[in-house]
Image: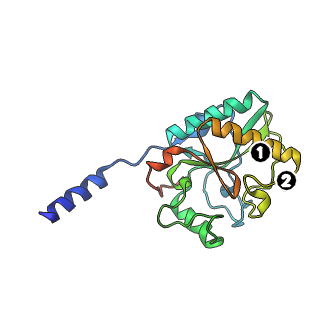
Amino acid sequence: MYLAAALAALSLSQAQPQPQLVDAAEVVDGLLLDIRYATAQNFVGRPLYAKARCLLLPGVAKRLAKAQALLRAKGYALKVYDCYRPRSIQRALWEAHPVRGEVAPPGGKGSNHNRGAAVDVGLARLDGGDVAMPTEYDDFSEAAWAASERPSAEAKRHRAILQDAMRRAGFTTIKREWWHFDAPEGREAAPLDQPL
């Protein structure tokens, strides 16, 4: 009896469809892509993605569109560094920098990036030009912390504008990365390893 119930539960869990990720560039008007893991300009030093795309759960993409609208009204646009990240890539990041709090371990819960429920973003001008931000993306120094006092006044002002828009759209921050924002949809989603 227990075996039949276990097999039925396994069959049901395997039948559950994988969540459908959407291309945020098709949902968020004027989204700027600077997907660093599709280039060698990242802390691993080599491209990890075959394609520069920002895939997210549909609800997360809608939140990002709301943040973008709030920022556009202030003369800024979102610049995206990373979105959905396959679990296999999470393993490569962990192997390159196995420090909890700076890179999520690939086992267990993994990262909300693995669920399509986290984004790494910065600000840019509406024409795509750079603005001062606290540090470069994937900087592991204290200056990159979400509340660090080390950056310049201009960079802190831009960080505050970004954080305000993202929070108003329903995202939360983490301590050590000014660029990382989690969406509540991550609580219900399972980690994925589908390729970009």
Identity of the amino acid at label 1? Arg
Where is 27 relative to 121, above or below? above
Residue 40 x/y as whole percent = 72, 61
Which circle marks residue 151 in the picture?
2
Q: Quadrant of the N terminus?
A: bottom left
Which circle marks residue 159 in the picture?
1
Q: Quadrant of residue 46?
A: bottom right
Residue 72 x/y as whole percent = 73, 30
Where is 193 relative to 128, above or below? below
Query: Do labels 1 and 2 touch, CB within 8 Å?
Result: yes
Circle 1 crowding by C-alpha within 10 Å: few under 14, some 14–19, many from 20: many
Q: Quadrant of residue 7?
A: bottom left
- Find numbered disc 1 in the image and state the secondary structure of the residue it sits on: helix
Give the residue displayed 52% in from the left and 66% down from the top. 106
In the rendered structure, which disc, 1 or 2, sits on the residue that comes first in sequence? 2
Identity of the amino acid at label 2? Pro
Residue 86 x/y as whole percent = 53, 57
Residue 164 x/y as whole percent = 70, 38
Task: Name the image colouring.
Answer: rainbow
Give the residue displayed 54% in from the left and 53% down from the top. 112
